[in-house]
């Protein structure tokens, strides 16, 4: 843990303790929704300068319609979810703080709507569980974080982006990934998509990486649990939901 403040100081600085239905836990956060959305908005603007976003109206409409339908069933409704397509052949999707979700054009070509719903629901799950906000809070500490939010300089936003991209590259913890998969199955099912979409997409990724050697990695799978374990875990979650 890299908290810069003692709990009592953090509390006086506006730390809120709230129950999060996504994690089923009571959590202490000094990053409120307003700060998270403000930071996410700046990061999104920065990303639009650094990455090539797709102008393909058909792709944009598809990610919007599938994404919004799934997001309506997220445990977290205090952010407006926004979806964008990045021109990139790598099979990947990611989320930044504040409800901004991105999917690569290469992934959209490979995935059918049930699979896309599963992938987007996984990213929405990270947002609902506030995984990246918690990591930012832990790495930056209160003062640096508030400096980023209030300063809004390009350098400060880039620093926050570095933290989030480092997190995305290194992968979230095993526990965070499995929770996002669990939420993905639940949200996509509630939205009327097949909950097997995520499993089926994992199997596509498995096929893509088969025989490519250990140096080949798929960003969406750059997490600690091996894909076989994620498939098994997602199938177990589907079975539990089916009994309810
Ligand atoms: Zn993930």
Image: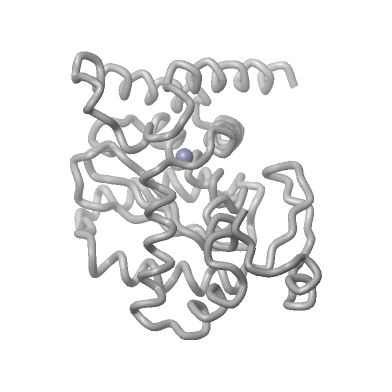
Taking depth in this image into account, of 134 and 120 the one nearest to the observer is 134
| Residue 243 locus on image (x, y percent) | 72, 16
Residue 191 can be seen, yes or no = no
| Residue 89 locus on image (x, y percent) | 18, 41
Is 25 rendered above or below residue 46? above
| Residue 115 locus on image (x, y percent) | 39, 30
Residue 145 can be seen, yes or no = yes
Is 206 rendered above or below residue 153? above
Is 158 rendered above or below residue 96? below
**What residue appears at the point 68 percent right and 44 percent down from the top-left corner?**
22
| Residue 136 locus on image (x, y percent) | 53, 61
Q: Tell me how the rendering is colored.
A: one colour
Residue 175, quarter of the rendered image:
top right
**What residue appears at the point 56 percent right and 43 percent down from the top-left corner?**
125
Task: Using residue 191 as the reference point, say whether residue 244 is left or right of it.
Answer: right
Taking depth in this image into account, of 116 and 89 the one nearest to the observer is 89
**What residue appears at the point 43 percent right and 59 percent down from the top-left corner?**
163
Residue 138, quarter of the rendered image:
bottom right
Residue 91, quarter of the rendered image:
top left
Give the quarter of the figure containing the C terminus.
Answer: top right
Task: Using residue 173 as the reference point, say whether residue 214 is left or right of it.
Answer: left
**What residue appears at the point 74 percent right and 59 percent down from the top-left corner?**
28
């Amino acid at each position: 843990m890299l908290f810069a403040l003692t709990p009592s100081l953090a509390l006086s600085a506006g730390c809120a303790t709230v129950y999060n239905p996504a994690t089923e836990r009571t959590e202490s956060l000094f990053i409120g929704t307003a700060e998270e959305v403000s930071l996410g908005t700046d990061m999104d603007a920065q990303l639009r300068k650094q990455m090539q976003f797709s102008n393909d109206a058909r792709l944009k409409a598809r990610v919007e319609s599938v994404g919004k339908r799934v997001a309506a069933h997220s445990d977290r409704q205090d952010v407006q979810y926004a979806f964008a397509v990045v021109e990139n052949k790598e099979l990947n999707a990611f989320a930044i703080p504040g409800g901004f979700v991105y999917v690569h054009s290469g992934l959209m070509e490979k995935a059918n709507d049930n699979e896309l719903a599963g992938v987007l629901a996984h990213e929405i799950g990270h947002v609902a569980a506030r995984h990246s906000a918690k990591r930012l809070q832990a790495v930056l500490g209160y003062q640096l974080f508030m400096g980023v939010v209030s300063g809004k300089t390009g350098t400060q936003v880039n620093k926050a982006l570095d933290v989030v991209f480092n997190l995305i590259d290194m992968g979230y913890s095993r526990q965070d990934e499995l929770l996002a998969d669990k939420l993905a199955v639940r949200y996509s099912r509630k939205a009327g998509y097949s909950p097997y979409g995520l499993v089926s997409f994992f199997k596509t990724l498995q096929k893509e990486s088969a025989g490519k050697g250990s140096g080949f990695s798929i960003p969406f799978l750059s997490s600690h649990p091996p894909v076989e374990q994620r498939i098994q875990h997602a199938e177990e979650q589907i079975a539990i939901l089916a009994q309810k």
